[in-house]
Amino acid sequence: MTLFRNVVFIAAIAGLVAGVVLACMQAYATVPLILKAEVYEQAGGGHDHAAAPATPAENAAGTMAMSSAAPAPAEAMARAEDEGWAPADGFERFGFSVVANIVTGIGFALVLVAVSEFAGGIGNWRQGLFWGLAGFAVFTLAPGLGLPPELPAMPAADLVQRQIWWWATVLATAAGLGLIAFRRSLPLAILAVALIVAPHIVGAPQPDSFETAIPEGLHHQFVVAVTLTNLVFWLVLCMVVGLVRGRFTGAATSLRDSFA
Amino acid sequence: MNTASVSLGASASSQSRLMQLALAAFLGIFVMGFVGFSHIDAVHNAAHDYRHSMGFPCH
């Protein structure tokens, strides 16, 4: 199991580095926007008269929310109880985000290293950049087209259906890019384009109504922040894999002789 | 991509190679799935900001 051990080791190092980098970027770029959105979420929708331009529908929602202002906090309390344990705001919440970043960073890296080994491996940091762009396209760009990163309190379709569409899109895009990069055949290239386009023709599950208390500007800012932080994450992850893997292949013989 | 020269664990037979790489990939998918996609409330709440920041489907 030398190969498995090496893959896990490289993935652990790359995931740790990229996860810490991503957590730092999130602390500045995305988490403040999530916290802003949670203010709207807790306000329960129609309270924000100053920010919401007066359309008839929203006015109606606003007066309805005002008339039912009393039960709203109780409702929120009940929801908080339903949702079970959650980390306390502040340091604890940030700590769990950092752990989630590192753990999934290692998860992404395991998949990345395993898949790239079939294609000869990520030999150096420059090859890593191209793998990083591919990973970004597969895991952020393609699913993000149909299901843009969403803030708390935004309307969304059924969770399971969205998760199925997300995974299907990731698989189809990865297969498509793989065919384009590693098979020199025109019919397969056409099939690849079809694979990449197909999930978007099927279409992501959408909510019944897009009405939300979140200002569009805030959401747009969030989509940009998520996309860019993920781009940097993928570039860092794959470059670190390229750098670390070089050391492993260089020392592979001696490592094997001494340990295995 | 153009230098498929050295590989990790060069001594492994191609079948064992396939098995080990598949194992690593499945381990990775399991980890991502558990942290980013599991429906357990406590897991969701712990990684809530992370899920939103990655554009994972949430709520």
Image (tube, helix red, strand yellow):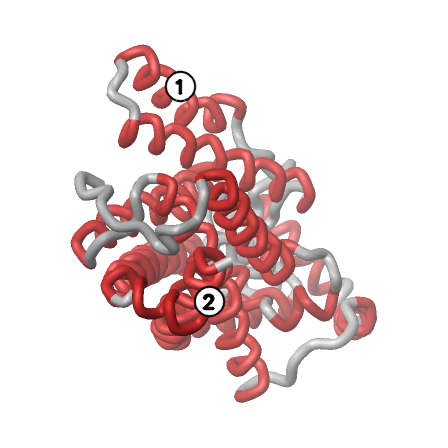
Q: Is residue A29 above or below residue A129?
A: below
- Residue at 65 percent of width and 50 percent of height: A60
Q: Is residue A28 visible?
A: no
The residue positioned farthest toward the bottom in the image shown: A91
Q: For mark 2, give the secondary structure.
A: loop
Q: For mark 1, give the secondary structure.
A: helix
Give the mark nearest the N terminus, 2 or 1: 1
Which marked residue is nearer to the observer: mark 2 or mark 1?
2
- Residue at 39 percent of width and 73 percent of height: A258
User: Dot 1, how many residues are within 10 Å of its Cα: few (below 14), some (14-19), or many (20+)?
Assistant: some
Question: Tag 2, which chain?
Answer: A
In the picture provided, is A89 more to the left or to the right than A67? left
Return the x and y of residue A257 as percentages of the image width and height.
Answer: 37, 68
In the picture provided, is A153 more to the left or to the right than B50? right
Q: Is residue B47 visible?
A: yes
* Camera-nearest residue between A49 and A79: A79
Residue A260 shows which numbered tag? 2
- Residue at 62 percent of width and 38 percent of height: A164
In the rendered structure, which amino acid carries the disc numbered 2?
Answer: Ala
Q: Is residue B17 above or below residue A29?
A: above
Q: Which residue in the structure is indicated by mark 1?
A: A194
Return the x and y of residue A206 as percentages of the image width and height.
Answer: 58, 36
Residue A68 shows which numbered tag? none
Return the x and y of residue A155 as percentages of the image width and height.
Answer: 61, 48
- Residue at 52 percent of width and 53 percent of height: B24
Return the x and y of residue B10 as percentages of the image width and height.
Answer: 35, 51
Q: Is residue A216 above or below residue A259?
A: above
* Separation of marks 2 and 1 at Cα, in angstroms: 45 Å
* Camera-nearest residue between B53 and A114: A114
* Camera-nearest residue between A176 and A249: A249
User: Dot 2, how many residues are within 10 Å of its Cα: few (below 14), some (14-19), or many (20+)?
Assistant: few
Question: Tag 1, which chain?
Answer: A
